[in-house]
Amino acid sequence: MLRLIKDTLISQVVTLWRVFVHAFDKTDTVEYPDVQPQMAARWRGRIILSRDPDGEERCVACNLCAVACPVDCIALQKAEDDEGRWYPEFFRINFSRCIMCGFCEEACPTNAIQLTPDFEMAEYVRQDMVWEKEDLLINGTGKYHDYNFYRVAGKKIGGKDKGEARNEAPPVDVRSLLP
Amino acid sequence: MVWEVGSPLSIGAILFTVIIVAAMLIWVERRLLGLWQERLGPNRVGPFGLLQVVADMIKIFAKEDWVPPFADKFSFVLAPPIIMFVILMSFTVIPFAPGVGVIDSDVGVLFVLAMASLGAYSVMLGGLASNNKYALLGSLRAAAQMVSYEVFMGISLLGVVALTGSFNLRDIVIAQTDGWFIIPQFIGFLIFMIAGIAESHRLPFDIPEAEQEIVAGYHTEYSGMKFGMFFVGEYLGVLLISSLLVVLFFGGWLGPAFLPPIVWFVLKTSFFIAFFILLRAAIPRPRYDQLMTYGWLFLLPLSLLNLMITGAFVLWQEGGM
């Protein structure tokens, strides 16, 4: 009997009181169009293509992002300049398909493709949701400020031969027995 | 006197006020729920979102008035007005203040109970006529719930009636001049409040329309203004139960003289409306069998006990024992 009274009355009254006290708490709601919400830095929003510290495109057109993309919204074509650097001839993201999963960012070996906290991407025309490389490229380095793929990678490009990358030993002549 | 009890003008004014207040309760409820859930609630249409109700009304009036082809047309159309009608009829006997009311009935308490029973027809017909299994489940639950909670809703009131010696709600208020009935009839108050929530199927006893279990219960197939009538009917029910609680247990319009009687009535009623909304914000819905067990095995014996003790007390006071 006491148990029943405790369950049916006292615990209910306690619940009522605890909910009532919430009336004096601050509301969690952000009145969005009037007040801009503070987005977390790691929020997965609009996708950008970053540049390395020297101002060159980071993307090497390896296609890993396009492969990782679960909705196939990334399309790109590889090209190579006279220095031997790879770059995308075109790089196209269809944002009406994109689900902002961030798999492309995880797949990217050069930190080129990155997701940003911006989410205001509504358009009136569907075709405007397709962004080309010029729309995606930014002038900065994004989240990684000193990373430059060609400086740490062993690939030979103009002005940097094999063995000249950071932390890279000069190539060994495998046909010679001399130390 | 144009404003005396029962004059056409006062009937019109009361009808208008009651319906407007019931409609505004939609806004009040959403704002209060927001307050208790650390949200804001509707605040964009008009000042403080007050015109949200108007926006909702425009929407609901402009909706297609659709009757499903598989429904029983006559009962389907008949069901929603019944609940509006019976609850508005119950308001006729409520004494809002001295000289403010529609009729001064000698059987006011019985009339309210009778009208509450008729309200069960609305949900039963609505569910049956819809020819939809969820609606049918909802109306089955509603019928069982309303029929069983009516029993001790009536019994819990008998203590008040015994203390007053009258079924007239106006007499009941006047009898509370020396002390509100909440003190001698505290158990009666609790039982009446619980039964009242169940009667108006508000949360936590909204089992007939439990969204998570049976879509929307008996009004699954309703849309447009027919749904609107069920919706406003629910808020009218909240208003009715709140005013009944005030009249029966909290001295109606009685209160210190620095405020006019009608203001006291409105203040007390608003308190109970806010309390009903707090209940909705806080208490989870019981299971269906829990509701029935709780009613028949706990509330019914308790209300009978309360009635017996009150009866014995009244007899002892009159020197009969």
Image (cartoon, coloured by chain):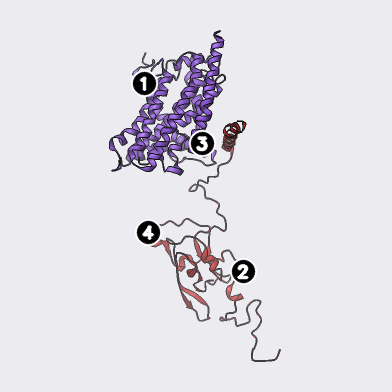
Chain colours: A red, B purple
Q: Which residue is mark 2?
A: A146
State the separation of the CA atoms marked 1 and 4. Answer: 56 Å
Residue B176 image offset from top left, x and y in percent: 52, 15
* Mark 2 nearby-residue class (10 Å; few <14, some 14–19, many ≥20): few
Give the chain of mark 2: A
Give the chain of mark 1: B
Q: Which residue is mark 4?
A: A125
* Local secondary structure at mark 1: helix
Q: Amino acid at mark 3?
A: Gln
Image-quadrant location for residue B130: top left
Q: Amino acid at mark 2?
A: Asp
State the separation of the CA atoms marked 2 and 3. Answer: 65 Å
- The reply to whether the C-beta atoms of the residues labelled 1 and 3 are less than 8 Å apart is no
Let me know if residue B256 appears in the view: no
For the point 40% across and 40% down, the residue is B137
State the separation of the CA atoms marked 4 and 3. Answer: 55 Å
Q: Amino acid at mark 1?
A: Ile
Foreground disc of the pair 1, 4: 1
State the separation of the CA atoms marked 1 and 2. Answer: 80 Å
Residue B290's tag is: 3
Q: Earlier in the sequence, mark 1 or mark 3?
A: 1
Q: Earlier in the sequence, mark 4 or mark 2?
A: 4
Of B245 and A2, which appears nearest the observer? A2
Q: Which residue is mark 1?
A: B11
Image-quadrant location for residue A124: bottom left
Residue B13 image offset from top left, x and y in percent: 38, 23
> Do the dots labelled 4 and 2 sit on one chain?
yes
